[in-house]
Image (cartoon, rainbow, N blue to C red):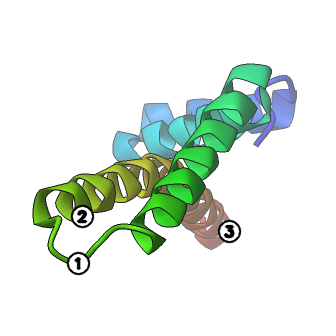
Amino acid sequence: MNLNDSDELDAIQDILSSGEDLTLLAEVHLGEDAAQFIKSDLGRYMVGRANQEIADAVEELKHCFWWRGNRIKYLQNQIKVAEMAKLWLIECLNAGRMALQTLEAQQQEQ
């Protein structure tokens, strides 16, 4: 969805004036924001940093002795946090894509 396109803006205005579910429109915008963030320098840095955190923790976990339970839990938590950060961005992108498909399907029905 391109907000610079007048046809798409007209479609958005139709949705708003007809009282359609505004949640779908918000999800589309959030998905667009997430995509722009991931493409930005900051987004690439954050994703790269998460990937590096995962790789470092996995490498350290490989060499951690089995009796160091607290250290193992700490490393597992580091991996989980970094994975969740990436997962939230992916979920936001997917929700936006699905919301856009739903809005387009609703427009075709009208």
The tag earlier along the polypeptide, 2 or 1, is 1
Question: Residue 108: which disc?
Answer: 3
Instruction: Report which residue position mark 2 lands on.
Output: 72
Residue density around tag 2, few if under 14, some if 14–19, many if 20 or more, within 10 Å? some
Displayed quadrant of residue 100: bottom right
At 76% from the left and 27% from the top, the residue drawn is 3
Residue 57 makes an appearance in the image: yes
- Vertical placement of 53 versus 26: above or below? below
At 46% from the left and 59% from the top, the residue drawn is 60
Task: Report whether 96 appears left or right of 60.
Answer: right
Q: Nearer the viewer, mark 3 or mark 1?
A: 1
The image shows residue 12 at horizontal and vertical percentages of 61, 35
Q: Amino acid at mark 2?
A: Ile
Marks 3 and 1: CB-CB under 8 Å? no
- Vertical placement of 42 versus 36: above or below? above
Callout 1: SS: loop
Residue 11 makes an appearance in the image: no
Name the foreground residue: 109 vs 75: 75
Q: Amino acid at mark 1?
A: Trp
Q: Quadrant of the N terminus?
A: top right
Name the foreground residue: 28 vs 84: 84
- Vertical placement of 14 versus 89: above or below? above
Question: Residue 5: which disc?
Answer: none
